[in-house]
Image (tube, rainbow, N blue to C red):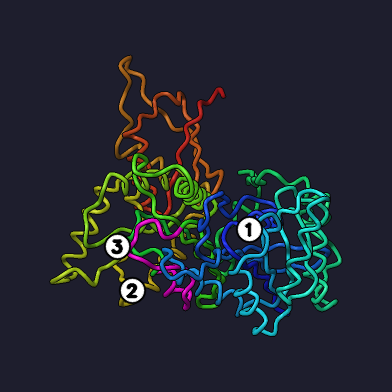
């Protein structure tokens, strides 16, 4: 049976994102006291009392047509409501009943779906008297809670949500996260999960069938959201010519040739000096974190513009993360006189300017005309396979012996020369190789680049960073 979907809707700044973060046990949605921070739909898996479901955070509903992105946000909310099995209608218990609340209530009553009226910001017992006015919405009994404090009322709301789920959906074993009210009350910091390089699961090749996450990053207005919307087949994120439209890192799941793909649309990353403190600054942090949690990163460029310093910094950030990568030259439809020769020349130029990602393939695509858009996924899948590839120790030592015989390592000022005794691969994602040598200080950066080039010539590793580590024999 497919997972149930629970959508949180309401006016801006009533605490939807705070409740969303509380339920998933991490600060995934940006929370700020300025209205309109959340614009797109945010999805995240969570569970309660043995029930697993998909929780959806939505932008604040503003019915004033003069408000920036108001109509676009409303369209995103309507999609979330249409998808949802249960709707949490959140209102502000401190501010009281608002005209927009009444309009939203009218909309939700027409859906014929279960709607739970959650009155947030009831932080003290004396504020319970504020509940009475919300009966006028005709949604049912108002349920008080404090999403910020994570009080027991949050657990009551979650109980109410799962009450309508079929009993067969409950799992015998509840995960640690969201298993009890106490867990919710004590979840204040984002849980970080790291993988040990010695984990045998990390040393397996990608079999091309497991879930794959792809983060699409780039400067503002290069077409990231348009590409995501086309690839997932629906208006998943708001598209606008205004830079900075996307605020959160938006996850979208879909199937591509039978494989589960998660696309992460991120906020456009501008130069630090141009980023205002607040929602945009938080969005940039989310974008950088999206790089770390993705399997593959697609750096998107604008074919109608030049490569900027910010593009180069992003390329370096991706390489430093050790992620597999693909470079997407979007808006290819705007380029005149397109030929194979031009594509080869541009590809070489891009790799020269983005030296940090010279190992990545370049895809010439157009989110607008859909030209080669699906090739972005295909190339990302190949890069994912390469970053988890393992080479046998015998082949590695044969390669390094031949490479050092062909081009001997340079000698130091004292005449001492590097000697490679033995080589082995110790990790994947990225492929990491340890060279046991006489003195690791003798492995110069230039010679390490040469050895990396020989690795790529022999085994490919297209689309993935490579790490070469020297270890002295006595260590």
Magenta segment main secondary structure? loop
User: Sequence order check: which comes first, mark 2 or mark 1?
Assistant: 1
Nearer to me, 431 or 319: 319
Identity of the residue drawn at 84% across and 62% down: 173
User: Sequence order check: which comes first, mark 1 or mark 3?
Assistant: 1
Residues at circles 1 and 3 in contact by the CB criterion of under 8 Å = no
Where residue 253 sits, quadrant-wise, is bottom right
Identity of the residue drawn at 44% across and 46% down: 466
Spot the residue most to the top: 414
Percent coordinates x, y for residue 52 in the rendering: 75, 67
Screen quadrant of the C terminus = top right
Percent coordinates x, y for residue 27 in the rendering: 62, 50
Screen quadrant of the N terminus = bottom right
Q: Mark 1 falls on what kind of element?
A: loop
When the figure is inspected, residue 115 is found, relative to residue 422, above or below; the finding is below
When the figure is inspected, residue 40 is found, relative to residue 461, above or below; the finding is below
Per the rendered image, the range of residues in magenta is 227-246
Q: Which mark is residue 35?
A: none
* Residue 469 visible in the picture: yes
Residue that carries the numbered disc 1 in the rendered image: 14
Nearer to me, 246 or 127: 127
Q: Mark 2 falls on what kind of element?
A: loop
Inter-mark Cα distance, 2 to 1 = 42 Å
Q: Mark 3 falls on what kind of element?
A: strand
Residue that carries the numbered disc 3 in the rendered image: 329
Task: Indicate whether residue 346 is drawn in magenta.
Answer: no
Inter-mark Cα distance, 1 to 3 = 40 Å
* Residue 462 visible in the picture: no
């Amino acid at each position: 049976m497919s997972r149930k979907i629970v959508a949180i809707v309401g006016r801006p700044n009533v605490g939807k994102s705070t409740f969303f973060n509380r339920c998933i046990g991490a600060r995934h949605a940006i929370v700020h006291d300025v209205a309109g921070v959340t614009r797109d739909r945010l999805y995240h898996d969570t569970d309660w009392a043995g029930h697993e479901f998909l929780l959806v955070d939505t932008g604040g509903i503003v019915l004033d047509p003069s408000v920036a992105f108001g109509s676009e946000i409303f369209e995103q909310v309507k999609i979330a409501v249409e998808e949802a099995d249960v709707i949490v209608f959140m209102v502000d218990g401190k501010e009281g009943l608002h005209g927009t609340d009444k309009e939203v209530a009218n909309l939700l009553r027409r859906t014929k779906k279960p709607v739970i009226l959650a009155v947030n910001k009831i932080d003290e017992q004396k504020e319970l008297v504020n509940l009475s006015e919300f009966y006028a919405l005709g949604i049912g009994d108002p349920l008080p809670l404090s999403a910020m404090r994570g009080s027991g009322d949050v657990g009551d709301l979650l109980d109410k949500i799962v009450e309508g789920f079929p009993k067969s959906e409950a799992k015998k074993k509840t995960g640690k996260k969201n298993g009890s009210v106490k867990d919710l009350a004590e979840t204040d910091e984002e849980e970080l999960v790291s993988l040990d390089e010695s984990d045998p699961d990390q040393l397996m090749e990608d079999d091309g069938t497991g879930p794959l996450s792809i983060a699409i990053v780039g400067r503002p207005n290069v077409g990231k959201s348009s590409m995501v919307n086309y690839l997932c087949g629906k208006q998943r994120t708001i598209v606008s010519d205004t830079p900075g439209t996307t605020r959160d890192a938006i996850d979208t799941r879909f199937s591509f040739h039978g494989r589960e793909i998660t696309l992460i649309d991120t906020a456009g990353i501008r130069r630090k000096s141009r980023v205002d403190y607040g929602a945009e600054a938080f969005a940039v942090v989310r974008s950088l974190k999206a790089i770390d949690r993705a399997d593959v990163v697609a750096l998107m460029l604008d074919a109608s513009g030049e490569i900027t310093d910010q593009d180069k910094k992003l390329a370096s950030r991706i390489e430093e993360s050790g992620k597999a990568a693909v470079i997407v030259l979007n808006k290819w439809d705007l380029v005149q006189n397109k030929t194979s020769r031009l594509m080869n020349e541009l590809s070489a130029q891009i790799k020269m300017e983005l030296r940090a990602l010279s190992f990545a393939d370049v895809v010439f695509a157009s989110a607008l005309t859909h030209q080669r858009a699906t090739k972005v996924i295909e190339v990302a899948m190949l890069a994912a396979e390469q970053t988890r590839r393992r080479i046998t120790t015998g082949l590695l030592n044969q390669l390094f012996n031949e490479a050092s015989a062909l081009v001997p390592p340079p000698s130091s000022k004292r005449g001492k020369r590097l000697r490679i005794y033995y080589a082995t691969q110790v990790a994947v994602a990225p492929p990491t190789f340890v060279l046991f040598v006489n003195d690791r200080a003798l492995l110069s950066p230039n010679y390490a680049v040469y050895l990396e080039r020989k690795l790529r010539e022999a085994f490919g590793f297209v689309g993935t960073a490579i790490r070469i580590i020297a270890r002295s024999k006595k260590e």
